[in-house]
Amino acid sequence: MENPLINMKNVDVAYQNHLVLSNVTMTIFPRDFLGIIGPNGGGKTTLIRTILGLIKPQRGSIEYALEKSDIGYLPQGNQFDDQFPITVREVVASGLVSGKMARVKRNQDKRKIIDRVLDQVGMRSLHMRPIGKLSGGELQRTMLARAIVSAPKLLVMDEPDTHVDNKFEMELYALLKELNQTMTILLVSHDIGIISPYIKTIACVNRNLHYHSSNEISEEQLKVYNCPIEIISHGPVPHRVMKEHNS
């Protein structure tokens, strides 16, 4: 077995004495595809921000076998002012500024790298469009390109399918499956039904963390894990399986 990229041990995280994560222990291995699920307010975003080093734990330890420049991050929501005068290409290029990719000195090499990633996310034809003129899905494609342009070892995403159209949602997960051949992926999602065909393991987060070494999880297991989310089944017609109830 390969050495882990990240090893978390007995981590507590609190905001103003309110405990958000309690005694979290988790090991992340190379080329895992980890789906992070849980209820709203359960600590999913806090977990990934802690992994990214943006939040300091009150207790416990986190050991890293990679550099900060080896991590790509796609946050939830739009982090750019849509009035800021910057194009799609410039946003993607900003992912090359720091860390190992800063050593790519030749402009021709940088252009090739950016063009390849723009092709991957389907934004090559819009590369000179100002970000203020993009749809929500187009902006998310652009931000994904920025996150992967430096070929990170670890890609961390917080609900990347927010504000995207159904077509790109399917394209997104197919692309992530391809990227997972060379990089580890941590994906926060509210819908286990959509992500289960693509992920390899699951972490249920609701203050505590329960790791599940499979991409399949039952309603009974979610109850044991104290992870109160709905399981949605996606077939030819997506549907939610509801429990029987009396009128």
Image (cartoon, grey):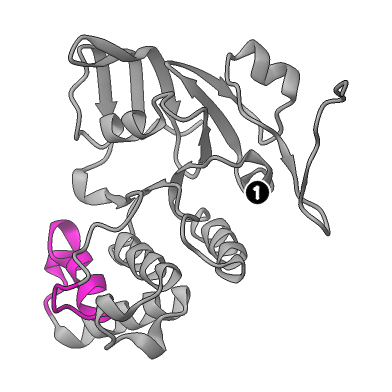
Q: Nearer the viewer, residue 81 or 173?
A: 81
Residue visible at 21% across and 63% down in the picture = 80
* Placement of 97 over or under 71, stated as above or below: below
Q: Could you say which is closer to the camera, residue 232 or residue 97? A: 232
Q: Which residue is mark 1?
A: 194
Q: Main secondary structure of the magenta part?
A: helix
Residue 85 sits above or below residue 166 on the image: below
Around disc 1, counting alpha carbons within 10 Å, would you say few (fewer than 14), some (14 to 19), or many (20 or more)? some
- Residues 186 and 14: in front is 14
Residue shown at the point (55%, 67%) measured from the top left:
165
Q: To which quarter of the image does residue 25 belong?
A: top left
Say which element carries label 1: helix
Q: Is residue 209 left or right of residue 126?
A: right
Q: Is residue 163 above or below residue 212?
A: below
Does residue 61 lie above or below 240 as drawn?
above
Q: Position of residue 3 (x, y in %)?
A: 40, 31
Q: In the rendered image, which quarter contains the C terminus? A: top right
User: Is-magenta flag for residue 34?
Assistant: no
Compared across the picture, whether 115 is left or right of 30 comes to left
Task: Locate residue 24 relative to residue 229 in the image: left or right.
Answer: left
Residues rendered magenta in the picture: 83-105
In the rendered image, residue 221, in percent from the top left (x then y), is placed at 69, 18
Residue 196: % across, % down: 66, 43
Residue at image coords 36%, 34%: 45
Residue 32: x, y in percent?
A: 51, 40
Q: How many tags in the picture?
A: 1
* Amino acid type shown at disc 1: Ile
Residue 99: in magenta span: yes
Kindly identify the residue that appears in the image at 61 percent across and 70 percent down: 167
